[in-house]
């Protein structure tokens, strides 16, 4: 049995993140989310996909506790969200690395804020820097790294705080296409290795189908859940085969057909 | 996406009253009233016998305007300023553009202006007095040494930093050197050169005030020095207020001209 | 500038000007331009004297105290203006006004209030230095990438942690350039203040030398001051360049 398939069976499918009747109206009257209810199962990667400007990032940031909801609630691991919390870690679209700090300090920053002793947090950081394939770059500064390497730092920083839920806001959109493909493959490996819940915002249908266990498709603003797709793709195989797999291509096509009507 | 929504939200928040309160002009008025009020209270307290309240200063200002003293003094003060500024602009832009176009001129001239830019040139005023006496010439030259460095350096940098693609475009269409200078380099450089003129004008005001306080008291400097010596502080403050207000008005005017000429996109926003 | 294949450093042309000065000085064209060699001899002569040392001490003290005050008040005000729209709209017109207004006109006011002494000089330094520090700290805070702040919040940073570990650092390039420009303005301020007060520090020496027509002494003092101002500017520009990668790595 492939590791991915094994993972699916293993997963207890308990909802890790529950979103209940969540609405968000920005102060100017812009209605971003309209009474959304959706579950994100534990140990799986769920993508949020939708037309641009539909409120995917808004939903993710509300789950992160970075912006307040207008009404409704979010439960993470059974507890309501009132602000950022240690069980969630965020991966930013623009990496959000501190240019004045080296890779080691950037990765250890979450632990630094918690008051973990320097030697301890640096040991943890080093482990995660190695696990994202950046071993040897601990003392490099962000401006010395390529875009792809910077996002690996962002990922390592999120992993270092050992959160149960990883919130990824279009993490690969600022890196070039080739790096992006490599990243997607590495992400699948990471999911297989770390038993974490991933929430993944993307605007790329191919990316969503390639990496997700579950895809939540949102409608145009004010967003509601328009469909939930669970791609049935055997992921154990060679990545190049998957991209030519008929199930993969069919799923991409189905989603494209359902999203096409939102385009002007 | 989020950011745009939030920016819009800011503009729409609150009632009509809130909108009026948040209007830039209202807030500017409020802050002006606060400052004038603080000045008035501090003057009545008084924090110092040499600190007249706002109202006294304003009535002294009205008095100086009414009896013509201020007008006469301003004409005297503006004469070396105007001559000095015109000389600085003509020579400064000329020198700056020359240095921008010619490497040898830049090598020879720019160090002097780079040093002058960061140096406390006010200390040269006594030397100018020795060389040219206490008359108009020394005052004009004081304005020039204060105003020129920034004009020269802005012109030099503006010309030097003409976008390379524009120059390549000119060359590819077989423009002559003369055409490149007059049709590409100078138009591209003019916003920065003009900004230099504005900064030079501000520096020229500093120069003329220092000249009138350090060389011989004439014009506005005379009103300041005389009323300081006879302890009529309202008149002294009124004269200082007048010259500062004049410089601020003139510089704002130059800023508006700058916006109108070179930044039509900014004008649309404000 | 290149001769053959050799690139001449930009400041080398000063040698030509120095030679020219020496020739004019020796020709005796004007008593206000003594030969440069004489001026340099005077620099060597007056720098070790106690009166120079005392002037330098007094001037340096006013300069340092004034700048410390300007930084301590300027940066928090700038950060506040960068964070709050209301504070920004209230203070910005005044900051812009004082930035371009002829502040030398205000020195007589400071003088009548605080007397012809050191306090006046310190206030003049503050008045000259503070506005550009405020404006640049404001610009620095406004250019912070929003996601950097969100990042700190998502890891549960307290407001103090966000201020001390994100805001101050992220705005550092602008804050540093504000301090550099403030220091250059402060050099001008301290000299203008001392020339107008004219009984303390270098102002007293200028007054002394010019009343006795000691041109070489006067120029010697000027050169020392100019060199000092230039050195401050260069040192801070160098420091600023070390932080340049900040700005380029921001979006």
Image (cartoon, rainbow, N blue to C red):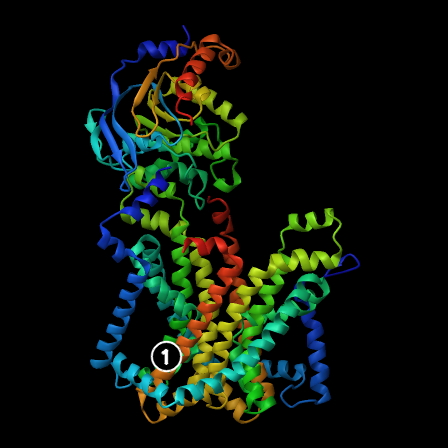
Q: Which x, y percent locates residue B207?
A: 50, 79
Q: Is residue A136 visible?
A: no
In the image, A101: left or right of A227? Answer: right
Residue bearing mark 1: B241
Circle 1 residues within 10 Å: few <14, some 14–19, many ≥20: some
Q: Which quadrant does the N terminus of chain A fall into?
A: top left
Q: Residue at x 39, y 89 (%)?
A: B68
Q: Residue at x 63, y 80 (%)?
A: C40
For residue C188, above or below residue A177: below
Q: Which x, y percent locates residue C48?
A: 53, 81
In the image, A208: left or right of B235? Answer: right
Chain where mark 1 sits: B
**Which of the 4 image quarters holds residue B246?**
bottom left
In the image, C213: left or right of B209? Answer: right
**A119 or C29: nearer the viewer:** C29
**B176 or B108: nearer the viewer:** B176
Q: Is residue C228 visible?
A: yes
Outermost residue toward the top in this view = A1
Q: Which quadrant does the C terminus of chain A fall into?
A: top left
For residue C230, above or below residue A149: below
SS category of the residue bearing label 1 = helix
């Amino acid at each position: 049995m492939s590791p991915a398939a094994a993972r699916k069976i293993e997963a207890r499918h308990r909802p890790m993140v529950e979103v209940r009747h969540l609405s968000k109206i920005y102060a100017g009257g812009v209605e971003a989310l309209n009474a959304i209810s959706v579950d994100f199962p534990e140990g799986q990667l769920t993508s949020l996909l939708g037309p641009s400007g539909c409120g995917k990032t808004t939903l993710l940031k509300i789950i992160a506790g970075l912006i307040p909801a207008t009404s409704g609630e979010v439960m993470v691991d059974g507890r309501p969200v009132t602000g950022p919390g240690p069980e969630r870690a965020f991966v930013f679209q623009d990496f959000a690395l501190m240019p004045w700090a080296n890779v080691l300090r950037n990765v250890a920053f979450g632990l630094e804020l918690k008051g973990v002793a320097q030697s301890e947090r640096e040991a943890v950081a080093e482990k995660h820097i190695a696990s994202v394939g950046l071993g040897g770059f601990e003392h490099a500064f962000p401006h010395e790294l390529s875009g792809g390497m910077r996002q690996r730092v962002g990922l390592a920083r999120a992993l270092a705080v050992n959160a149960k839920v990883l919130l990824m806001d279009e993490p690969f959109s600022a890196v070039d296409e080739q790096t992006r493909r490599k990243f997607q493959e590495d992400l699948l490996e990471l999911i297989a290795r770390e038993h974490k819940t991933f929430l993944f915002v993307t605007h790329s249908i191919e990316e969503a189908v390639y990496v997700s266990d579950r895809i939540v498709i949102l409608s145009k603003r004010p967003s509601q859940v328009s469909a939930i797709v669970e791609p049935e793709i055997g992921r154990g195989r060679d990545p190049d085969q998957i991209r030519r797999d008929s199930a993969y291509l069919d799923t991409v096509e189905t989603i494209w057909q359902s999203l096409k009507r939102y385009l002007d | 996406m989020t950011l745009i929504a939030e920016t819009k939200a800011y503009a729409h928040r609150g009632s009509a009253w809130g909108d009026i309160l948040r209007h830039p002009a209202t807030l500017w008025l409020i802050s002006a009233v606060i400052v004038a009020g603080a000045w008035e209270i501090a003057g009545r307290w008084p924090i110092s016998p040499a600190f007249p309240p706002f109202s006294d200063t304003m009535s002294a200002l009205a008095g100086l305007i009414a009896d013509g003293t201020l007008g006469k003094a301003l004409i005297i003060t503006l004469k070396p300023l105007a001559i000095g500024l015109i000389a600085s602009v003509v020579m400064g832009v000329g020198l700056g553009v020359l240095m921008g176009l010619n490497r040898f001129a830049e090598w020879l001239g720019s160090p002097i202006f780079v040093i002058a830019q960061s140096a406390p040139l006010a200390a040269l005023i006594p030397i100018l007095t020795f060389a040219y006496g206490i008359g108009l010439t020394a005052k004009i030259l004081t304005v020039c040494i204060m105003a020129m460095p920034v004009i020269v350096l802005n012109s030099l940098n503006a010309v030097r930093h003409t976008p390379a693609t524009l120059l390549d475009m000119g060359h590819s269409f077989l423009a002559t050197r003369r055409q490149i200078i007059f049709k590409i380099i100078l138009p591209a450089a003019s916003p920065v050169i003009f900004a230099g003129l504005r900064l030079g004008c501000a520096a020229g005001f500093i120069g003329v005030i220092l000249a009138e306080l350090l060389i011989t008291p004439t014009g506005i400097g005379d009103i300041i020095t005389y009323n300081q010596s006879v302890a009529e502080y309202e008149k002294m403050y009124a004269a200082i207020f007048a010259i500062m207000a004049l410089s601020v008005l003139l510089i704002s005017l130059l800023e508006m001209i700058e916006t109108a000429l070179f930044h039509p996109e900014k004008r649309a926003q404000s | 500038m290149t001769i053959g294949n050799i690139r001449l450093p930009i400041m080398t042309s000063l040698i030509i000007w120095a030679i020219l000065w020496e020739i004019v000085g020796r020709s005796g064209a004007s008593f206000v331009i003594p030969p440069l060699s004489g001026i340099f001899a005077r620099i060597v002569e007056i720098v070790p004297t106690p009166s120079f040392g005392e002037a330098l001490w007094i001037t340096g003290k006013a300069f340092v105290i004034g700048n410390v005050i300007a930084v301590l008040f300027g940066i928090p005000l700038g950060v506040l203006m960068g964070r709050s729209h209301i504070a920004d709209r209230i203070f910005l017109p005044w900051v812009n006004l004082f930035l371009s207004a002829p502040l030398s006109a205000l020195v007589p006011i400071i003088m009548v209030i605080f007397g012809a002494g050191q306090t006046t000089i310190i206030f003049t330094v503050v008045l000259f230095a503070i506005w550009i520090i405020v404006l640049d700290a404001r610009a620095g805070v406004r250019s912070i990438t929003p996601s950097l702040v969100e990042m700190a919040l998502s890891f549960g940073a307290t407001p103090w942690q966000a201020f001390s570990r994100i805001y101050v650092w992220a705005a550092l390039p602008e804050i540093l350039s504000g301090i550099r420009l403030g220091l250059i303005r402060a050099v001008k301020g301290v000299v203008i203040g001392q020339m107008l007060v004219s009984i303390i520090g270098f102002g007293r020496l200028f007054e002394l030398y010019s009343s006795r027509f000691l041109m070489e002494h006067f120029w010697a003092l000027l050169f020392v001051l100019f060199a000092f101002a230039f050195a401050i500017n260069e040192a801070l520009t160098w420091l600023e360049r070390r932080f340049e990668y900040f700005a380029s790595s921001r979006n």
